[in-house]
Image (cartoon, coloured by chain):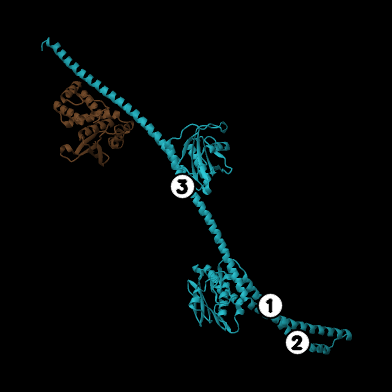
Amino acid sequence: MKGIVFVKFNEFIEEVWGDEFWDELLSEANLASEGVYTTVATYDDEELFTLVGLVVVKKGISAKDAQFAFGKWVFKELYNLAPPGAHDFKDVFEFLHAVQDFIHVEVKKLNPDALLPEFEFLSETSNVLTFKYLSPRKLCYFCEGIIHGLAEHTGQDIKVSQPECEHEAGEQCVIEVEKV
Amino acid sequence: MSSTDKPVLEVDELEKRVAVLERKISREKKARNIAENKLEQYSLEIYQTNESLKKALASSTKKQKELEYLGRASSYVGSEMKLNEIIDNVVELTGRFCEADFGFYLVAKKGNIIQEGLNKVWCLNRGWQDNAVLIEVIGKLLPLENTELLNSWNVLDIDYFPSNAGQALKQVCYTNFALAGGKVGWLAILNSHSVVEPDVLSVLNTAREHLLSGISRRLTDLRILKRNLQLQESLEKLENARKQLIQSEKMASLGQLAAGVAHEINNPVAFIRSNMEVLQDYLKDYKLLHEDLKKITYSSKTLSTEVFKEAFEKIDIDYIDEDSVELLQSNIEGLIRVKDIVDNLKSFSHSGSEELTPIYIAECVDAALKVTGNAFKYEHQIDNQVSELNLTVLGNLGQLQQVFVNLFVNAAYAMEAGGELTISHSSSEEKVVIHITDTGQGMDKETVSQLFTPFFTTKPVGVGTGLGLSVSYAILEAHNAQVTVDSEVGVGTTFNLSFPTITQQ
C-alpha cells in the first residue's frame, strides 16, 4: 500500500488520540517498518490492518467505525494532494464518476504499480447512485467514510448504505449513495 | 497524593513524554533518510532514463533519416523519370544523406570517361554545377579501367588532392553498374570531413540494390520498346505488301479480262464507226441538196414547190432524217456503254481505301458482272437473284467487287462449254450469305482443299496467277466474312460467302 495512506493514518491517530497513543500502537504492533513511514515508499497492507486492529481493541470501537472515521477524515487530506483538475467537481455523483475516469488515471501516471479500487456503476437517478466497490483489500467501510468526507466538502447531505457487503455474507460490496 | 509525590510523578511523566518524542524524532529522521535516499535514487533513475531517451531519440532520428533516404531513393527508381534524371536525383539524395561535399555520376567505356558533354557535379551548398576539373581528378582516382563490376559501395581515402581542383577532399565513396552497350555507370560522393560509417554504407548498399534493379528494368524496357518498334515496322511492311499483293492480283485479273473487255469495247466502237460513215454519207447528200437548191434559186431567182420537192426526193430526205436520229441515238447508247465499261474498270482497278462502309451487295455484284460480262458467252446464262434486293453488308466496294470478279471469272472458266451462273442469297439475323453457283466441271476434294493456297492453280501456265482465291480469302477475312465451298465433279461448284449483318458488327 502506498506510504501516503500510512502517513495520513499516523496523522489521523495523532490528531484524534495524540502521539503517545500512536507510539503505544507502534511499540505493541512490532512492525517490519518500525512505523517509519514516508509518502515515497510502499508498505505491506498487513501493517495497516494490524494497526487498525490494535485501535479497535484499545479504544473498544468496531473495525467498521475505525475505517469509516479514517476515511471521512482522510478525504480532505487526499483532496489537497489531488491533481488540479480534480478540484473542479461540485457534486458527489459527478466526483464519484470522475474517480475512475480521471483521478485514478492521474494516480496511475505517478504510481504505475498502485492498486486502486474499481467502481462499477449499476444505476443512477437524480438522487440515488449505486455502484459495485471492487477491491481485493475489501475496504468498503473506508470507502463509505471517504464518500462522507466528499459530501462534507461539497456541502451536500447524503446517506451511504450497502445493500450488499462481503463483510456481511454478501457476494460483493454494493454501495448506495442517496442525496437527502 | 502527597506533595512530595507530585514532582516525582511529573518527572516520570516528563521522562515518558521525552521518550515518546525521542522515538518520534528518531522515526522522523529515519523517514527523512529513507525519503532522501529515495529522492537520490529517483534522480539517478531520471538521469539514466533521460540519457537512454536521448540515445533512443538519436537512434530513431538516424533510422528515420535512413528510412527517408531509402524511401525517396525507391520512389525515384520506381518513378517515370528518365534514367539520367533518376540517377541524378539518387546522387543528390545520397550526397545529402551522407552530408557529402560533392557527388556526381559519370559514364565510362573501356576505362575512358564518355560523359557526352555532361560535366555536372552536385555540391552540397550550390546544387548542380559544371566542374570538369573535379570529374577529371576523381576520374583518375577511380578504378575505371577495372572491367569487373563492384557489388557494393567502396570507400577510398584520398592521399593527395591537387590544389587547383578546389576544396581539399579526403574521401571518395563510389560504386558502379552496367549500362547498355558495354558502358559502365559510376556514382561517387566526395567528403572533405566526415568519414562514411559502416552502418551508413550498409544503407547505401541497400539503396544501391534498388537502383540497380531499377536500371536493369529500365534497360530491359528499352530493349522491349525497340523490339516493339521493329515489330511495328515489320507489321506495316507486311500490311503494305498485302495491299500491293491485292492490287497486283487485281491488275493480273484485269489482264485476263483484257481481251474480253477489248471485245466489249470494240463492238460499240465498230457500230459507232459504221454509223458515223453512214452519217457522213447523209451529210454529203445534204450538201448536194444544199448546192442544188442554191444554184436553182440563184439562176431562176425563184424556187417552185415542184423543184423543191424533186430535189428532196432525189436524196430521199425523209429516210435520211429518220435514220440519222436513230443512228445518233445508237451512237450515244454505244458511247454510254463504253463509258460504263471504262468506269467499271476504273473503279475495279482503283486501289482505294480499306475502310468498311455499308454497301449494297446488288451494286457490287452488278459492277463485277459488267466487268466480267464478256467472259460469259451466248451459251452461258446468268441468273442474278440479288440484283433487286436491298441487301447491305459492312464492306469495301472495290475489294468485294474484286472477290466477285474473281469468282465469276473462275465460274466462267469452269463452264467453258456453257452453263448457268446463279447468284443467290440466304439471310438470317446474324448473317447474310451469298451463294455463287456454277454448273461447271466441279472440283475433287483435293483441289477444294488447296483452293485458297497461294500459287495453286488449275489453269494453264500464263492464264492464272494462282493468287486469285487466296487474295479473295484474305479480303473476306478482313471483312469478318467466312467462305465455304461445295463442289461435285461434273455437277458444279457453289461458293458461300457469309457476311455478318451490320447490326452484328
Residue B217 at what x, y percent from top left? Answer: 48, 49
Residue B426 at what x, y percent from top left? Answer: 49, 76
Judge by depth and name the residue closer to the eye, B495 or B339.
B495
- Mark 3 vs 1, N-terminal side: 3
The subunit carrying tag 3 is B
Residue underneath mark 3:
B213
- Mark 1 vs 2, N-terminal side: 2
User: Which image quadrant for residue A108?
Assistant: top left
Quadrant of image for the N terminus of chain B: top left
Dot 1 and dot 2 within a common chain: yes
Residue underneath mark 1:
B335
Identity of the amino acid at label 3? Ser
Q: CA distance from mark 3 to mark 1?
A: 77 Å
- The brown-coloured chain is labelled A
Q: Mark 3 or 1, which is nearer the eye?
A: 3
- Mark 3 vs 2, N-terminal side: 3
Image hue for chain B: cyan
Judge by depth and name the residue closer to the eye, B274 or B432.
B274
Residue underneath mark 2:
B318
